[in-house]
Amino acid sequence: MHSDAQAMRIANLNARIDRLPSWSLSYGVLVLVGVAYFFAFYDILTISFTLPTLTKFFHMQGYQIAYPVTANLFGYVIGAYILGNVADIIGRRRAMLVTVGILALGSLLAAFSTDVTTLTIYRFITGLGMGAELSLAATIITELSPAGRRGKYMQANYLWGGFGLGVTPFLALWLLGTGADGWRLIYAFGALVALVSIFARKNLLPESPRWLVLHGREEEAEQMVQKMEANATRRFGSLPELPPPVAEASESGFPTAFLFKAPYLGRLLVTLAFWLVWYITVYAYLGYEPTLLIKQGMSTPNGLLFSALGDIAIPLGAVIVYLLIDKFERKVTVSSIAFIFAIALVLMAINANPVLTFIGSFFSAMMIAANSAAYVYTAEAFPTRARATATSIGDGVGHVGGAVAPFIVVWAMSALGASGTFGLLAGIVALSGVIILSLGIRTVHLRLQEIAS
């Protein structure tokens, strides 16, 4: 517990960040953190686009098809929880170095898989590293942004991942076309990008001043905020008036225990429920869309091509939300995205019309990209003391939904057919929208300390 004087210094520093009129660090930081989003969706798409090849290469049968996907997601859940707590204890920057190091190792090993067992183990390791990537990215951008621009800068950060993701399917198709071992090159490329990111983050990624001051490193935090203020003054000439400082909870102890207190437990349950349901559909869709399209009657090349063409919409979805994210209440934006996704999946269930299939695929990919708004909402709903932990539990443990998704898809394809599976996924993702719309809290244009109180 901080003294009254310490609490006031913390509140004053946070107020100084919140009054900044714009992003006040290098825009390269947004690009650097944005690579985390590239990793997340690149990693998902690698299994999606390599799975048809791997099924034949490793002679997978029945539920073996689900093993690498599920192992990766269970690794994600474990890594998210552990590294989320670590980030609240040792800092966001150091935790992000750990995550990308594990990612590089897992991706490199996956490129040298020899059978279903080794592939499953290596995908689990990759999941451990991926676990906290998105939640830590959301956490650090949220904490570096002024109050009125959190959504915008989080989305700007996501844009780089979105644009990279739009290219990923075509990169995957090209590498698959290089020969029988083309799938190995897809995983090796992910490892290469991860290795480059280790050095970039070590040299260029700053620590969150909100975390620094909360953990007694006031001099470092002061230097960071002074730099941000100097940059803003050069750009705008003068700074707005300092808003009234608002104290934030500063209790010591294990971050998870802090979240079991009111009002944070209720928020944690809502965000966790949302992510659990959302990820069932997202991972089922991203992991099995080509397979479902092929089972609807498309040839294998056309199924992969339709999936790749639909992914062109990912950058567009990121741009649209960038323009709108701070104009509407966050929970309304997130729920609307879920409802549009549901409608798009219904269109894909109508397998007799290739045009509807393309439109459904296009808008599905667009909404997956647009839902970066939910990362902003999850991060801003909790105090600095346990923000990384809470975000990692919501997003990370929420991946249990993704872990069971392959089994739901395998069952649904057998019981309902491909079109019925698309319809089932539409109903599931619509439920996630209902959860956040009816139970979520207001966050837009409020300071982090106001939301936390």
Image (cartoon, rainbow, N blue to C red):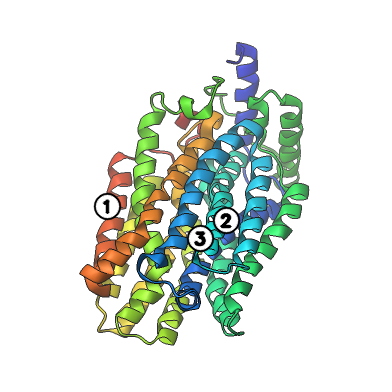
Question: Where's residue 92, x and y in %?
Answer: 64, 40
Label placed on residue 442 = none
Q: Residue at (55%, 46%) from the top-left corner?
A: 132
The crowd level at tag 1 (other Cα within 10 Å; few <14, some 14-19, many 20+) is many
Instruction: Give residue 260's quadrant in the image.
Output: top left
Q: Residue at (63%, 23%) from the top-left corner?
A: 10
Instruction: Give residue 418's quadrant in the image.
Output: bottom left
Q: Mark 3 against mark 2, which lies toward the viewer?
A: 3
Question: Where's residue 203, x and y in %?
Answer: 78, 49
Cα distance between the residues tagged 3 and 2: 10 Å
Total residue callouts? 3
Cα distance between the residues tagged 1 and 3: 31 Å
Question: Which residue type does callout 3 highlight?
Answer: Thr
Label placed on residue 120 = 3
Residue 259 vertical placement versus 93 (above, below): above
Circles 1 and 3: CB atoms closer than 8 Å? no
Q: Earlier in the sequence, mark 3 or mark 2?
A: 3
The crowd level at tag 2 (other Cα within 10 Å; few <14, some 14-19, many 20+) is many
Question: In which quadrant is the C terminus drawn?
Answer: top left
Q: Mark 1 against mark 2, which lies toward the viewer?
A: 2
Cα distance between the residues tagged 1 and 2: 29 Å
Q: Which residue position is annotated with label 2?
A: 126
* Residue 328 seen: no
Q: Mark 1 against mark 3, which lies toward the viewer?
A: 3
